[in-house]
Image (tube, rainbow, N blue to C red):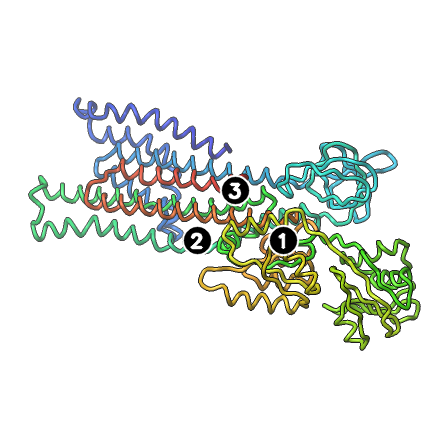
Amino acid sequence: MNKKQKNLLIRIIIAAVFFVPLYLISEEFIETGLPNWAVFILFLIPYLLVGYDILRKAFKGIMNKQVFDENFLMTVATVGAIVLGEYGEGVAVMLLYQIGELFQSYAVGKSRRNISELMDIRPDYANIETEDGIEKVDPDEVEVGSIIVIQPGEKVPLDGEIVEGNSALNTSALTGESKPQDVAAGDQVLSGSINMTGVLKVRTTTEFDESTASKILDLVENAASRKSKSENFISKFARYYTPLVCYAALALALIPPIFMMITKVGMAGYASTGAVWRDWVLRACTFLVISCPCAVVISIPLSFFAGLGGASNQGVLVKGSNYLETLSEVKTIAFDKTGTITKGNFAVTAVHHSPLDEKKLLEYAALAEYNSSHPISLSLKQAYGKKIDPARVKDVQEISGHGITAKVDDHDVAIGNEKLMKKIGVESHPCHHVGTIIHVAVDNIYCGHIVISDELKEHSKEAMAELKKAGVEKLVMLTGDAKSVAEKVAAEVGLTDFRAELLPADKVTAVEELLKECTGSRRLAFVGDGINDAPVLSRADIGIAMGALGSDAAIEAADVVLMDDDPMKIAKAIKISRKCLRIVKQNIAFALGVKVLCLILAAVGVANMWVAIIADVGVMILAVLNAIRCLFVKNL
């Protein structure tokens, strides 16, 4: 509880201690002949003590020409009740309203703290080795390529590669995975992880602003600015609703008594004309208290905020509540293959060569691909197994969707798919092996092909089954690989629809065709990880990127980022979004339903001030409690 909340709590307690006995014995004061003005002053003490800030905000709102808000409603209603002689009810309404405000403030603050704790991954310092020992410096000051030391219990300050040491890392703040990750020399580490056991020496690969922890925090901080349709609706609703109920309350206070006085209808039930006015003005004040829109205005943004936090805790970063809302409507998902359904751990499984021998074919392929970080390129360089001399390679040209051409040792080398061979006028030989087939031509002579195979991610098949259970109607794989490879992978994971041999532009076209099939509120998501997936991620209704191994371009273009590259998290993200939207709809229906009912009861004189405050504060508390359920999504 912060200082402001503590001050409000103290005011509430003091006001309650003063008000409750006063309310219980106020009738006796009047019977003993205590002047009415003295009773008024006694009740004014707890009223001003607990409500002076509401009065001040209402006055400021009037001065700033922003009249219609909950402070104005409460001020008019309570002042009206006190002017009519209902001192106890006026003070009670303000007191209970402030209790509700305190609860709301505490609940919102607690949810924010929970999310902040979940995302408390920004490191405070980095350990740099110097001649005098280890020196603590600001992570911003660490240059790329520096060696940092990470002691047990410390956060990893920057992304990097382990050069010395073994340990276990706690990556739960990044991925939602509670199981420690064992790491050793040569492994990559992400900033925001916590080193649990051994001392690690890490060579940094990014600057602090580009590190994983900084990117995650930036995504979370910016998420609040992207509002959902429900939040935008509530903002517009409150703008029109509040002045509308104020005018309705004014009409309730004026029209019925004027009508009764002119027509004499219903006047028999009142002792005097003053009693008629008093009754209808009191009903109008009760109407204003009930109409306060706090429950809806507070609980809806809080529901989305808690939903975003709950998703973050599970290693799913959603860049805004608008994307969380769209995610709940996803009925079709298109997947990239490599790095999304499969691990992207390519390995050379066969080399079919002629006239060059196998080693020479691999040498040409590895040299031509030396500057690429694509998984296929890495597998070729690994199969070659020797140190590459870049001086032997020049005039490297990458042809998107085809492959690479380069001059190696003054020989023209082309390495890629069948399309590249056709482009350069070389006839390629088909291969009966299942895998990615890399054809190689040297000096416009076909020299053979290399077979590279990938393996499925551990949970890919299970993820597809979970998505079907979650209500996703269509699952499609879009890949640039050969049809035989795509067919094999699709069959293994349980997909019946796939499109193969696609260029990046063809993927966009395929997604646009799938979008035409998504009618009504059905939405399409695309899941990918490569730089060539960025256009498709942007074109889909919602783009989902693999965050651990995915490219920066894919993560930037995506709306949802899976921090551990686990496809099972897609179904989890959809379930979280649907739970959040269910809670939002529950709160809207419950809050507005209760308010409409109580407004009708107030208008006909059945509901009094006590019912009014229950309808306002009680509904707000229940709606906020319901909204906080969005934080608890672990077992979905």
12 left or right of 371 in image:
left
Identify the residue at image location x=38%, y=40%.
Answer: 620
Q: How many marks?
A: 3
Q: Nearer the viewer, mark 3 or mark 1?
A: 1
Question: x and y percent of residue 611 in the render?
Answer: 27, 37
Comparing 162 with 596, the one in front is 162
Q: Nearer the viewer, mark 2 or mark 3?
A: 3
Question: x and y percent of residue 457 in the render?
Answer: 68, 49
551 left or right of 617 in image:
right
Residue at which label 1 appears: 493
Question: x and y percent of residue 528 in the render?
Answer: 64, 57
Mark 2 element type: helix
Residue 517 visible within the image: yes
Q: CA distance from mark 2 to mark 1?
A: 36 Å
Disc 1: CA contacts within 10 A as few (<14), some (14-19) or many (>=20): some
Mark 3 element type: loop
Q: Are marks 3 and 1 in contact (CB under 8 Å)?
A: no
Q: First in sequence, mark 2 or 3: give its number.
A: 2
**Residue type marked 1:** Val
Query: Among all residues in the image, which is located at the extreme front?
Result: 432
Residue 230: mark in rendering: 2
Identify the residue at image location x=76%, y=35%.
Answer: 167
Comparing 238 with 170, the one in front is 170
Q: First in sequence, mark 2 or 1: give its number.
A: 2
Q: CA distance from mark 2 to mark 3?
A: 23 Å
Give the quadrant of residue 290: top left
Disc 2: CA contacts within 10 A as few (<14), some (14-19) or many (>=20): some
Residue 395 visible within the image: no
**Residue type marked 2:** Ser
Residue 636: mark in rendering: 3
